[in-house]
Image (cartoon, rainbow, N blue to C red):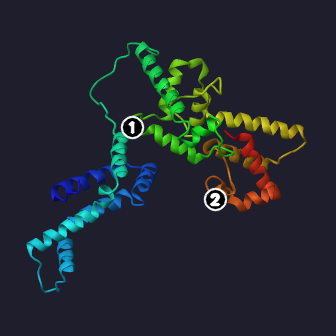
Amino acid sequence: MGGSDPDVLSSLASRLSRLGKDCGPEEDARIREASGGVGLTPITHAIVEALDPDRQEARARSIHGLTEGQDPTKAQVLQAAQVLAKEAVAPLATKPGLRQLLQDIKRELEQVIDEVSKDTLIFAGASAEAKEKAKALVTSFEKFLTENKDEIDALQFFFSVPHRERLRYDDIKVLAATIKAPPRSWTPEVLWRAYEVLEKDKVRGASSKRLLTDLVSLVRFALNKDDQLVPHAERVRARFDTWMAQQVNRGRGFSEQQTRWLEMMRDHVAASLEIGIEDFDEVPFVQEGGLGRASQVFGAELEPLLQELNEVLAA
């Protein structure tokens, strides 16, 4: 609201500081995107510094052109304090999207832990209430997919709307962030568990250990493109095994070392949807010698091989 009350700003700085300690790289990236590149820590520090009397006095001297020996009046210091305060909170005051995001992140990170009450097992299995909640969640998720098929790039891919050649990891990240934001607060784990409760015989893989790319499997299952809900990594491994068998049948052999590199590429695609030359500068490839070593192992076949794997293992 444009206020500059010191007590309010002090409380705000304290709250932002606590929130900043709970944020991870993913939240930090979302904050920087919404703020135009400024992280939460610099915003907090700017507010704290705006409340520093020495900085307020120095700014008053600068504003009014006072020399070192001239002391600013109380009115001049107050004016300078207001200027500093408005500058410090400008990223928040001028960006409603950032303010909303900070509130959303706070809700996402909040978790109430009951260390007093003791649970008693009264029933093993999915209760009628649990099934109703799971059904409501699945219905909401599938409705969301249909209603947003023209708005979200990842969904355009699944709905076969004219789109890029392959689904990109950034598309899945955007989809994951969208469904995780309040009021939905959906995660791959939560959605997986809901389908597990409703259709256990069609779901494979523990619901507590999900990769972001498992959203691919969830969307495909929700849209009836797959008969079973299978972890994305498992689907990639199955496709890889089929491809390797085809190479053997065609007389195309790979050495033990090449096979080990191919398996690393397979696992990278399982976690990131695709692989490119630039990925050889990342773990685990860089630990094995990176792009230089990969070029030695595969020679001129490296880039065509990457293109082939992307096509074979694509979502």
**Which residue is drawn at the image coordinates 36% and 51% (left, top)?**
98
**Residue at screen point 34% across, 62% down:** 42
Mark-to-mark CA distance, 2 and 1: 36 Å
Quarter occupied by the C terminus = top right
Is 48 displayed left or right of 169 in the figure? left
The disc placed on residue 12 is: none
- Spot occupied by residue 22 in the image (x, y as percentages of width and height): 36, 48
At x 76%, y 55%, the residue is: 303
Circle 1 SS class: loop
Residue 47 screen position, x and y as percent: 26, 61
Q: Amino acid at mark 1?
A: Pro
Q: Callout 1: few (<14), some (14-19), or many (20+) C-alpha neighbours within 10 Å?
A: some
Q: Position of residue 163 (x, y in %)?
A: 65, 43
Give the x, y percent position of residue 192.
52, 28
Per the image, the residue denoted by label 1 is 182
Q: Considering the numbered disc 2 on the image, is that residue within a helix, a strand or a loop?
A: helix
Q: Quadrant of residue 3?
A: bottom left
Q: Which mark is residue 281?
A: 2
Left or right: where does residue 121 sit relative to residue 6?
Answer: right
